[in-house]
Amino acid sequence: MKDRLSQIRDLAVKRLSEANDLKVLDEIRVEVLGKKGELTQILKGMGGLSKEERPIIGQLANEVRSEIEAMLEKTKKDLARKAQEIRLKAETIDVTMPGKVRELGHKHPMTQVIDEIKNIFIGMGYEIAEGPEVEKAYYNFEALNIPKEHPARDEQDTFYINGVGDFLLRTQTSPVQVRVMENKKPPIRVIAPGRVYRSDEVDATHSPIFHQLEGLVIDKGITMGDLKGALAEFAKGLFGEDTKVRFRPHHFPFTEPSAEMDASCFACGGKGCRVCKDSGWIEVLGCGMVHPKVLEMCGIDPKVYSGFAFGMGLERVAMQKYAISDLRLLFENDSKFLKQF
Ligand code: DAH
């Protein structure tokens, strides 16, 4: 029996030292220590032993039992530690490896230009106004002193909604002027940036959709001097402190008198270069004193109030500022192009 017990122990020790997962450990436990296990069988067979033999074998069996239990426990811990070591090794992060570069988006050059211009005017106390892109013909034309049959309607090739009718895609941001005057009492000082539409063929300088920014100031005693001062200040903000401006007489139906404003070329300072096509000047915007008829149609008394307005194409500003030679680049959204700004 003694031999049998030491056999059981030796075999268990051997098996345990070879065991490499918890399932095997459990099998060994059941086979050796379980109810039907080898050791239990021996203890059960002790009835046939003599009085003297019984305590000796009993003690030995108990020793073997606790030895195996202790070894089981130890092996279990060893296996758990090994498993953890393997896991930690697999999860090790090499902090010296170069990181993955994730590309960040950024503002489109048009948005950058619009934000910059907005900030200049906000700094001068202007508010931002908005109007719908699907507009009533009344706001886009009539209220701006462009009656039916007026040639300006042909000049601005209009996208009408449902044929030539009451609704259209606005061809300019000027209708926002009318909406503001209808809804707000003077003093008024607003700018309105936004998308406008004209049925033009796409080429390097034309697109059926583009952006304009409108400005409107109405108060008592506003003069052409205020217009020139505000717009000269704007040009300095946009193109630099040394920028000079000049005003050339022009015609718009909704202003009287009307002018176009040029700024001295920011690229060459006026000497002449590629940006200004050797003229030293770049055309920036149209402007003028709001026509008394327009004020009247919007419910503002032209005998009490006067004001000025201006409007500019924003793609042209972006193209000049960033030396972009083809308008289409601004709409194609090729990330290789956009990344440069
Ligand atoms: N709406 C004009 C255009 O699309 C631009 C413009 C000129 C707006 C003079 C104005 C202005 O407010 O006073 O060509």
Image (cartoon, grey):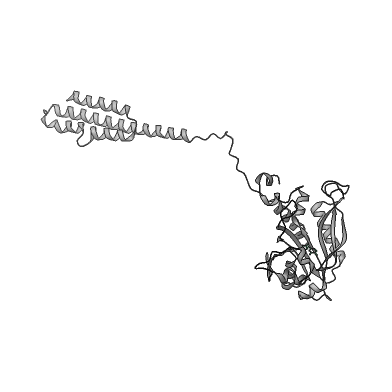
Assign the N terminus to one quadrant of the image: top left
Judged left or right of residue 171, residue 279 is right
Q: Position of residue 124 (x, y in %)?
A: 78, 61
Q: Position of residue 19 (x, y in %)?
A: 32, 29
Identify whether 155 is placed above or below 72: below
Q: Position of residue 321 (x, y in %)?
A: 77, 50
Give the quarter of the image for residue 99: top right
Identify whether 46 is placed above or below 215: above
Of residues 206 and 33, which is closer to you in this image?
A: 206
Of residues 262 and 128, which is closer to you in this image?
A: 262
Residue sitting at 29 percent across and 25 percent down?
14
Residue sitting at 46 percent across and 34 percent down?
90
Give the quarter of the image for residue 26: top left
Q: Is residue 110 visible?
A: yes
In the rendered picture of this protein, how many numbered marks are placed on residues?
Answer: 0
> Ligand 1 shows up in which quadrant of the image?
bottom right
Of residues 262 and 12, which is closer to you in this image?
A: 262
Which residue is outermost to the top?
A: 3
